[in-house]
Image (tube, rainbow, N blue to C red):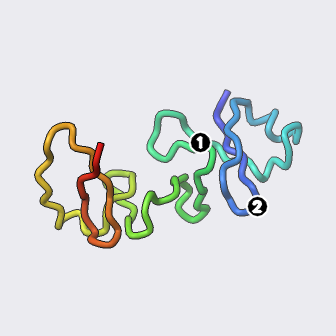
């Protein structure tokens, strides 16, 4: 058994199923060409709402903010100016990303 992500026409993941390749190939769940194998527990494992990139062969979530970029090293999105961040964290202080100042800012609890 393996994990397969079913993609819509825009390569967005609409479901992840556990099945064997023969069952996927049978068309019982839909067009076999709309399924891509994914490996649970590995970076880039598919999840509903993620986007599949056929050139890279990976799945990525939507960026949490428009000014964040993908970090290949961390396998996640990070602030574009991550090296600039020098915020001193205070325990139990909620922070949110402010796209106008391109930094983390405190919020009220």
Image point 65% across, 32% down: which residue? 2
Q: Position of residue 84 (x, y in %)?
A: 17, 67
Q: Secondary structure at mark 2?
A: loop
Q: Position of residue 30 (x, y in %)?
A: 86, 45
Q: Is residue 32 depicted above or below 23 in this figure? A: below
Pointer 1 residue: 38
Query: N-terminal of the two: label 1 or label 2?
Result: 2
Image point 71% across, 63% down: which residue? 10
Quadrant assignment for the C terminus? top left
**Residue 27 in which image quadrant:** top right
Image point 66% across, 49% down: which residue? 13
Quadrant assignment for the N terminus? top right
Total marks placed: 2
Q: Is residue 84 left or right of residue 41?
A: left
Q: Secondary structure at mark 1?
A: strand
Q: Is residue 9 left or right of residue 87?
A: right
Q: Tell me, yes or no, whether the two marked residues, 1 and 2, touch with CB atoms within 8 Å.
A: no
Q: Position of residue 99 (x, y in %)?
A: 35, 68
Pointer 2 residue: 9
Q: Extreme front residue here?
A: 108
Image point 38% across, 65% down: which residue? 68
Q: Camera-side residue: 22 or 14?
A: 14
Q: Which disc number belongs to residue 1?
A: none
């Amino acid at each position: 058994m393996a994990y397969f992500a079913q993609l819509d026409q825009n390569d967005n993941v609409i479901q992840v199923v556990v099945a064997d390749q023969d069952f996927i190939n049978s068309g019982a769940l839909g067009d076999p060409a709309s399924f891509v194998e994914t490996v649970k527990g590995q970076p880039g494992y598919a999840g509903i709402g993620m986007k599949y990139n056929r050139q890279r062969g990976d799945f990525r979530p939507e960026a949490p903010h428009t000014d964040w970029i993908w970090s290949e090293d961390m396998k996640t999105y990070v602030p574009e100016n991550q090296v600039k961040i020098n915020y001193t964290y205070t325990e139990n202080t909620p922070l949110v990303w402010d796209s106008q100042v391109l930094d983390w800012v405190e919020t009220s609890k």
